[in-house]
Image (spheres, rainbow, N blue to C red):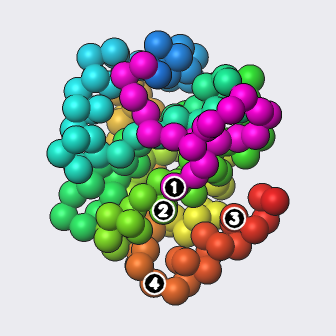
Amino acid sequence: MGITRTSPTNELTTEPMRRRHLRRVLDIEESVHKRPWTHRVFVDELSQVRTGSRSYIVAYVGDTLVGYAGLFYSAGDAHVTNIATHPTWQGRGIATELMLDLCDLAVLNECTAMTLEVRASNDVAQKLYRRFGFVPAGVRKKYYENSEDAIVMWCHDLQGADFASRLAHIKESRR
């Protein structure tokens, strides 16, 4: 996974999400989602981390928490539960770093595939996911707020050499 934040710098670092992060995580959640998760949902999700069925991470630039992401593990697959970057920090590679860490976690947890849903209107996110090898596999009608469709995307063969090469290329290109 990414770098653990040890001192205030302007570097982008990531670390496991903890309850102490939730106030800032909720600020971001409310700024990017029409129907944000509640504090209770995040607490419940974090309680599942101890069972090994979830992973959650946060991203910092210096001392500023700028994004977060999560995975749910099931039957050899990893499902991206959420990924968000504060609006003032979007377009700076934070979502790419979060996705790299999620992919690393999925590989470490011996997952063979990853899946996610993305808003049909969110072309920027779809482009990011395609960069990681995700391909559209279906549509969930009116998934978001009972009005907007979600595109279901999958990435397979996470344990293969091609996926490892893809991740290595993405890591190298961000330097």
Q: Which residue is mark 4?
A: 160
Counting the numbered discs, the total is 4
Q: Nearer the viewer, mark 4 or mark 2?
A: 2
Image location of residue 128, percent across then percent down: 64, 54
Q: Specify few, some or many for label 3: CA neighbours under 10 Å numbering under 14, 14-19, or 20 or more.
A: few
Question: What is the distance, in whole Å, between disc 1 and disc 3 at their CAs?
Answer: 12 Å
Q: Secondary structure at mark 1?
A: loop
User: Which residue sits at x=55%, y=77%?
Assistant: 164
Asked if the residue under mark 4 is in contact with the one under mark 3, i.e. CB atoms within 8 Å, the reply is no
| Mark identifier at residue 171 | 3
Which of the two discs, 1 and 4, labels the residue nearer the N terminus?
1
Disc 2 marks a residue whose amino acid type is Asp
State which region is magenta.
1-20
Q: CA distance from mark 3 to mark 4?
A: 17 Å
Mark 1 or mark 2, earlier in chain = 1
Q: Is residue 19 left or right of residue 119?
A: left
Residue located at (64% from left, 42% from top): 13
Residue located beneath label 1 in the image: 1
Report whether 64 appears left or right of 77.
Answer: right
Residue 77 found in image quarter:
bottom left
Q: Is residue 6 magenta?
A: yes
Separation (CA) of disc 1 from disc 2: 6 Å
| Dot 1 or dot 3, earlier in sequence | 1
Is disc 1 in contact with disc 2, using a CB cutoff of under 8 Å?
Answer: yes
SS label for mark 4 = loop
In this orientation, does residue 85 appear? no
Structural distance between the alpha carbons of marks 1 and 4: 18 Å
Question: Sequence order check: which comes first, mark 3 or mark 2?
Answer: 2
- What residue is shown with label 2? 104
Comparing 130 with 22, the one in front is 22
Let me know if residue 105 is in the magenta part. no
